[in-house]
Image (tube, rainbow, N blue to C red):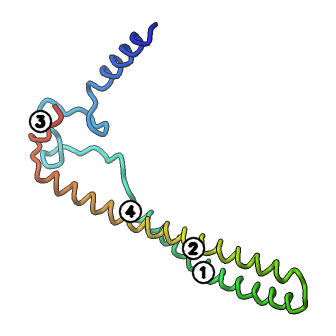
Amino acid sequence: MSFEDEWRQLKEDAAAKSSGMRLNGLPAMDPGGPRYPASGGTAPAPDYVVQRDDLGAIGHDAFLLFNGMESGGKHAKVESEAAAAALKAENFAMGAALATVNKTWETQVKSLMQACAHISNHLDYTAKSSKQDDEWIETDLKRISVSKLSEYFK
């Protein structure tokens, strides 16, 4: 089979499959008109749902982790700085090495804290923007009549 023949067959198959398809995979409207809650019918279940409670819980855990790393990271920094200073005072080469490890530790803790803050802030933003998007769509759709929507999808 040539490429052109195969391509034509694939396009025909796709057209046949999509003839009854609706936006977001909704079932085709019945001939008597659309069935929405306003007209006594039932709306299909949404296929994309953001659980704001779930996002909030994950964001809160990231916030708690941020706070725990901040206090734990500072404690480790103070203790290792003291150990490095004591070793340096006794002319141990390990004192300088421990000071270097301490600087690396501090950088890594700050990076992890920034990541936790980013996760927490992003999830807060996602929950808020999702709610705002839902409200905007709902308001916008209320302005459009069902018959006007049917015209768009013919």
Across and down, in percent, residue 12 comes to 33, 16
Q: Quadrant of residue 90?
A: bottom right
Across and down, in percent, residue 74 comes to 65, 84
Instruction: From the image, tell me which residue sits under label 4.
Output: 126
Q: Which mark is residue 70?
A: 1
Q: Which mark is residue 113?
A: 2
Across and down, in percent, residue 143 comes to 11, 53
Which kind of residue does numbered mark 2 sit on?
Answer: Met
Residue at 66% across / 80% down in the picture?
A: 73
Q: CA distance from mark 4 to mark 3?
A: 33 Å
Q: Residues within 10 Å of mark 2 (few under 14, many from 20)?
A: many
Which kind of residue does numbered mark 4 sit on?
Answer: Thr
Q: Which mark is residue 151?
A: 3
Residue at 56% across / 75% down in the picture?
A: 66
Q: Nearer the viewer, mark 3 or mark 1?
A: 1
Question: CB atoms at circles 2 and 1 under 8 Å apart?
Answer: yes
Judging depth in this view, the residue of 126 and 46 nearest the camera is 126
129 left or right of 110?
left
Q: CA distance from mark 2 to mark 1?
A: 7 Å
Question: CB atoms at circles 3 and 2 under 8 Å apart?
Answer: no
Judging depth in this view, the residue of 98 and 50 nearest the camera is 98
**Tally of numbered tags:** 4
Across and down, in percent, residue 6 comes to 42, 13
Check disc 3 and report its element: helix, strand or loop.
helix
